[in-house]
Image (spheres, grey):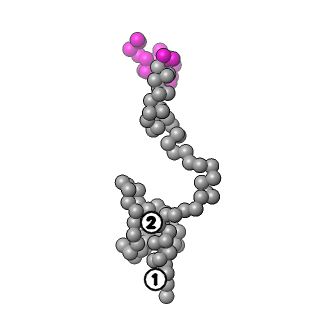
Amino acid sequence: MPSNLFMGSAMGSRAEVPQEWAPAARLRSLIHPRLHAGWAMRSPKNIDRLPRLAYKATEAPFVIGVSPSFFAEHVRPEVKWIRRGRLQLVPISELQRWLEENAS
């Protein structure tokens, strides 16, 4: 095997995978989705037609029409959150409850 296989000098400007390695590369992409560009982030074509049950923490302030700083200070401490790892979701019902309780 040439020592400069991925250096670009012998095979052009871009590094290329030898043909005998191609099946292994495909298998790795099936085992680990992040190795296959774009596969992990695909969503259904009609995603906008599905009903939302919750909003991400970054979306919630704009849904109720307030600034992120106002939301962080006044709304966030008073609503229940769903936390899974780094993901934080607030159910739509919680935002509706907060709006009804704070309506004058």
Mark 2 nearby-residue class (10 Å; few <14, some 14–19, many ≥20): many
Residue 36 in percent (x, y) is at 49, 35
- Secondary structure found at label 2: strand
Q: CA distance from mark 1 to mark 2?
A: 17 Å
The residue singled out by tag 1 in the image is 102
Q: Residue at x 43, y 21 (%)?
A: 6
Q: Give residue 81's position: percent from left, percent from top.
A: 40, 66
- Can the viewer see residue 36 in this picture? yes
Residue 17 at x, y = what percent? Answer: 48, 21
Residue 6 lies in the magenta stretch: yes
Q: Kindly identify the amino acid type of the residue bearing the numbered disc 1.
A: Asn
Looking at this view, is 104 or 9 the one in front?
104
The label number, if any, that marks residue 90 in the structure image:
2
In percent of width and height, residue 32 lies at: 43, 35
Residue bounds of the magenta highlight = 1-20
Question: For the residue marked with disc 2, what is the amino acid?
Answer: Val
Residue at point 41%, 60% (across, down): 88
Secondary element at image label 1:
loop
Q: How many marks?
A: 2
Disc 1 or 2, which lies upstream in sequence?
A: 2
